[in-house]
Image (tube, rainbow, N blue to C red):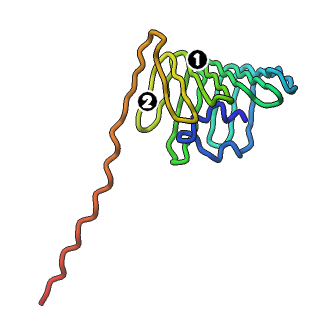
Amino acid sequence: LLAATVAAGPALAKSTDRQQPMDLSAANMDALLSDDSVSTLEGSVSIRQGSLEVDADKAEIHRKAGEIDRIVLTGSPARLRQISDQGEPMDASAAQVVYTISSEVMVLTGNVVITQPRGNVRGETIKYDITTGRLDGGGDGQRVQMRIMPKAPAPAAPAPAAPAPTN
């Protein structure tokens, strides 16, 4: 369930991670497992599920009607790492990550850096729509920066074999 927090969308997240066991650890936990509650993990929070790795200072898990509704990660920075189905790593860090499950929207704020092999995005606020894959940044008075790496060239075709000598 918490993997949905950081699964940066179908294109970025490994699809099998949500079916893996989730391991959580922290220095302190204040949890209430009722239908409408907030559970808080604090102090070197570590979440592992499949290829997903989350490290934060604090994680708040908000439940409504028995389902996880919103997850808030904070840290200096909070960091998310995951491998896509294509085997590409994604690394994201921000002071705060808020994931609202019902809208499938993740908002990263505070010195946001998202890095993938084909490029990176930096800004103060980045909104990520997991359903569509759309990134929306800026609008907060700060500039957004992107670097897009060129596509790797296709491997060269092997040279044709020389014709056999004729006698």
Left-right relation of 61 to 130: right
Quarter of the image holding residue 94?
A: top right
Q: Which of the marked residues, 2 or 1, is nearer the chain's N terminus?
A: 1
Quarter of the image holding residue 18?
A: top right
Q: Nearer the viewer, residue 148 or 91?
A: 148
Label of residue 95 in the image: 1
Residue 133 drawn at (x, y percent): 52, 35
Dot 1 amino acid type = Ala
Name the residue rendered at 76%, 23% in the picture.
62
Residue 74 drawn at (x, y percent): 64, 18
Residue extending farthest to the left is 167
Name the residue rendered at 61%, 35% in the picture.
7
Q: Quadrant of the N terminus?
A: top right
| Secondary structure at numbered mark 1 | strand
How many residues crowd mark 1 within 10 Å: few (<14), some (14–19), many (20+)? some
| Circle 2 residue | 120
Quarter of the image holding residue 165?
A: bottom left
| Secondary structure at numbered mark 2 | strand
Q: Is residue 163 above or below residue 159?
A: below
Residue 162 drawn at (x, y percent): 19, 74
Q: Quadrant of the C terminus?
A: bottom left
Residue 50 drawn at (x, y percent): 66, 43
Dot 2 amino acid type = Asn
Name the residue rendered at 68%, 29% in the picture.
102
Residue extending farthest to the top is 141
Name the residue rendered at 44%, 26% in the picture.
121
Query: For the residues marked 2 and 1, what is the alpha-carbon distance in whole angstroms?
Result: 17 Å
